[in-house]
Image: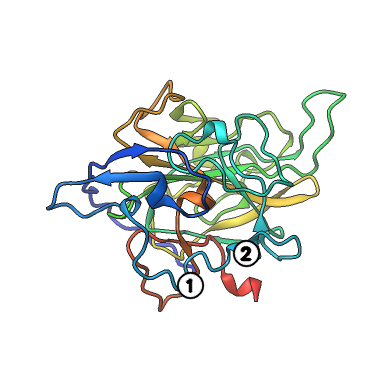
C-alpha cells in the first residue's frame, strides 16, 4: 500500500478561494463555520459544503476519543491559534499549551503514517535528540523524537493547503536519516538540526538550507499519493505520538502571520476536515482526507 513515487512535478493550477469565517464548536460542521464562493467555471474547494454522502465519514472519530483505543486523539491546537473555521475539536482532558498549532495523534512508536491527500514533500527539519531538558529544574524527556516534514497539497480539492507532521521517528523520504551521523539523533535537544526547504511555524515560515541537510539525502519534490507512506511515529518521553498541523488558503489575512503567505490559516484538524479510512479501492468524495494511519490497526 505504501509506495513512494519520485516524478517530474507539474505546476499546480491554483484555485483562488474566497472564504469568510465565523466561529463554531460543532465537530465537523465546516459548512456552518466557513463559506466560500468561486467562479462557476472553477471546481469548488472542499470547504464550500459537506460531502453528499456521510457514510463512513468521520467514522473513526468516536474510537479516537476513547482512552482505550490503540490510536487516539491527543492534544488539539490552542484555539487562539486557529484563524479559520471551528476553534474547538479536542478532548477536555488534554488541554493545549499556549501557542500550540497542531493536533496530536497518540499512537505506538513506529506506527506507519500515511498521506491523507495527494501532496508534494517541500521541507524538513531533523531536531531529534536522545533527551530534552531546557533547564536543570525542568523535566527530562527521554527520548525526544522531533523529525518534522512539511507538504503542500497538489489536489484541486485543497489548493495550497499545507500539512506538517512532527515528532516522527524516521521517514523513507530522508534516505540517510539515522544512517548518517549528521542526520541522526543528537545527544541533547537544541531546537536545531539538518534542515532544508519550507517549514511552517505559528507566526512565520522559513525556506532555507542549513546544518548539512544533504546528509539526510532528502527526496524533496516527491509527490505522494493519498495512502502513501510518510514515515513512522515517534516518542517524547513516555508519550508516543505524532503531531499534525494544517494551514488552509483564504482570501482573508491571517493576523498571526508576520512572515510568509498571509492568506494561509491554521485550522483545528479534527473539526475542520472530514475524514475517511484509506483503502486502495475506496473512491473518496471531493475534499475528504484519509485518516493518516491504517484504520485496520483499530479493529
Determine if residue 178 is in view: no
Q: Which residue is mark 1?
A: 56
Above or below for 84 versus 165: above
Q: Residue at x 41, y 63 (%)?
A: 226
x and y percentages locating residue 98 in the rendered image: 64, 29
| Mark drawn on residue 62 | 2
Q: Nearer the viewer, residue 116 or 119?
A: 116
Compare marks 1 and 2 and give the one earlier in the sequence: 1
Above-or-below relation of 109 to 133 = below
Label 1: state its secondary structure. Answer: loop
Residue drawn at 40 percent across, 28 percent down: 254
Q: Residue at x 68, y 52 (%)?
A: 241
Identify which residue is drawn at 31% across, 58% down: 7
User: Is residue 161 toward the left or the right of residue 147 in the image?
Assistant: left
Q: Is residue 293 left or right of residue 8?
A: right
> Looking at the image, which is closer to me, 158 or 130?
158
Residue furthest out toward the top = 258
**Residue furthest left as drawn:** 41
Amino acid at each position: 500500500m505504501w509506495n513512494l513515487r519520485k516524478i517530474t512535478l507539474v505546476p499546480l493550477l491554483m484555485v483562488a478561494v474566497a472564504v469568510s469565517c465565523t466561529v463554531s464548536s460543532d465537530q465537523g460542521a465546516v459548512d456552518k463555520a466557513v463559506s466560500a464562493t468561486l467562479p462557476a467555471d472553477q471546481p469548488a474547494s472542499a470547504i464550500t459544503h459537506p460531502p453528499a454522502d456521510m457514510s463512513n465519514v468521520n467514522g473513526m472519530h468516536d474510537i479516537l476519543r476513547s482512552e482505550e483505543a490503540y490510536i487516539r486523539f491527543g492534544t488539539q491546537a490552542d484555539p487562539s491559534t486557529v484563524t479559520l473555521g471551528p476553534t474547538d475539536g479536542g478532548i477536555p482532558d488534554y488541554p493545549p499549551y499556549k501557542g500550540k498549532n497542531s493536533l496530536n495523534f497518540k499512537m505506538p512508536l513506529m506506527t506507519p503514517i500515511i498521506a491523507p491527500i495527494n501532496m508534494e514533500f517541500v521541507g524538513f527539519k531533523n531536531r531529534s535528540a536522545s533527551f530534552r531538558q531546557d533547564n536543570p529544574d525542568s523535566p527530562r524527556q527521554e527520548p525526544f523524537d522531533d523529525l518534522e516534514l512539511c507538504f503542500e497539497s497538489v489536489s484541486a480539492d485543497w489548493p495550497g493547503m499545507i500539512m506538517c507532521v512532527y515528532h516522527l521517528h524516521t521517514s523513507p523520504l530522508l534516505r540517510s536519516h539515522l544512517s548518517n551521523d549528521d542526520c541522526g539523533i543528537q545527544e541533547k535537544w537544541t531546537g536545531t538540526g539538518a534542515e532544508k526547504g519550507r517549514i511552517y511555524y505559528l507566526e512565520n515560515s522559513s525556506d532555507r538550507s542549513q546544518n548539512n541537510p544533504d546528509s539526510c539525502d532528502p527526496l524533496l519534490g516527491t509527490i505522494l499519493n493519498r495512502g502513501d507512506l510518510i514515515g513512522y511515529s515517534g516518542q517524547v518521553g513516555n508519550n508516543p505520538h505524532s503531531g499534525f498541523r494544517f494551514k488552509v488558503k483564504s482570501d482573508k489575512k491571517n493576523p498571526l502571520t508576520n512572515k510568509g503567505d498571509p492568506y494561509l490559516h491554521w485550522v483545528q484538524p479534527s473539526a475542520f476536515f472530514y475524514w475517511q479510512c484509506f483503502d486502495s479501492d475506496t473512491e473518496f468524495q471531493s475534499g475528504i482526507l484519509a485518516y493518516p494511519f491504517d484504520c485496520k490497526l483499530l479493529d
